[in-house]
Amino acid sequence: MDSSLVIQLRRHALTRQGLQSEAIFGSGLAATLAAIEHLGYVQIDTISMIERAHHHVLWSRVPDYQPGFLNQLLENRQIFEYWFHAASYLPMRDYRFAQHRMAAVRDSTWANYHDIPAKLMNEILLRVRDEGPLRVRNLENNKGKSGSWWDWGPGKRAIEKLFLQGDLMISQRIGMEKVYELPERMLPANLDIRQPDLADYAGYLLQSYLRAHSVVTFEQLTHLHTNPALKKTMRELLEAQIASHQIEEISSAVLPKAYAETSALTQALSAAPYVHLLSPFDNAIIHRKRLNQLFGYDYKLECYVPAAKRKYGYFCLPILFGDRFVGRIDCKAHRQEQRLQVISIHLESPINKPALFAEALMQKLKQFAFFNGCKHLDIQNIEGVLAT
């Protein structure tokens, strides 16, 4: 598995993910925007055992990241919230590439939204236009108005459809609650909002994944895309870029049918001895099959597994050390106590330079506690493991 080629591909992939430098994107708000633009998206998730995934992913790359930065970037019209493979923050420059999904919802090809009356949606749009940004709790406050769109179920689904088809945008989140606004009040002037054709969209996907990962698989490029025409277009684009020597096809026992930038096969990189505790939804690991193929790391998020069947823990975080995933660690932020508890740690063996790893891990855990708003780090459950 650890051939020289695979090791170099790992290092290029991690470097492109911003995980081989302490602050490759810089600091503050500008670095947060740079990270989102480079990664292409940051997935949003609601699980709060520790700081939520979208904040965690950005903190892993911007050491002085603050959760308030995302609302600032929304207000600055530099990012927007929509769907990538899941709910995500995306660079505003890529807004036009969300149009294909918006069109699918508008054309009622998404079954969940085909039965919502147009009159209901028009009433919602009129209220937002006249009264300003709308929160879903506004629907709850009017639930008693029988026969109107204020009924909780239909009203909520109507707002969701308006958002998904591009007639409403999210102007901010208050906690995890969405605030909806009209696109004309959110989109920058002169933004390109043309709907891309298949060639444009395939090019966007390929460029985004190569920029963020350097090494990609076809499954990764077309993840959750079922359109045969898009897959055909993607294959043609890959063949064209292979012919022009922009990328090369890799086929090996561990990484069959992958594609890498030519530079990843010619430029040797060294591994940086950093420890990262990654979110289960981190861009670097979200494609589990590629993760297993490229890094030999079999990871499963067990919060969706019945407690009796969990092997490692409810919300274990992958531990990255240098260019290898060396274990997983389960943590919980007890916010009222301002205490970050390390519930368990499971290390792969052997770990190269164990003393350096233990020191770097402790430093990262202290930083992680601070990021989670915790003054106290509780490691009593793992002291014996670290001592060995």
Image (tube, grey):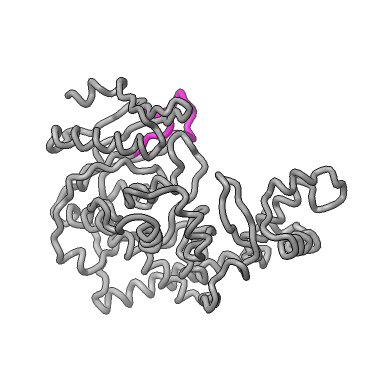
Report which quarter residue 297 is drawn in.
top left
Q: Is residue 307 magenta?
A: yes
Q: Is residue 119 magenta?
A: no
Residue 6, image x and y in percent? Answer: 19, 54
Q: Is residue 160 left or right of residue 12?
A: right
Residue 107, image x and y in percent? Answer: 67, 67
Total labels: the figure holds: 0
Residue under the image location 62 percent in, 53 percent down: 179
Front position in the image: 65 or 322: 65
Residue 376, image x and y in percent? Answer: 35, 27
Q: Which residues are magenta?
A: 303-317
Q: Is residue 310 above or below residue 9?
A: above
Front position in the image: 33 or 327: 33
Front position in the image: 100 or 379: 379
Residue under the image location 80 percent in, 44 percent down: 143
Residue under the image location 43 percent in, 73 percent down: 233
Q: Is residue 183 left or right of residue 219?
A: right
The reply to whether residue 121 is in sight is no
Front position in the image: 159 or 233: 159
Report which quarter residue 255 is drawn in.
bottom left
Q: Is residue 361 above or below residue 261?
A: above
Residue 338, image x and y in percent? Answer: 42, 29
Q: Is residue 88 left or right of residue 272?
A: right
Q: Is residue 369 left or right of residue 132?
A: left
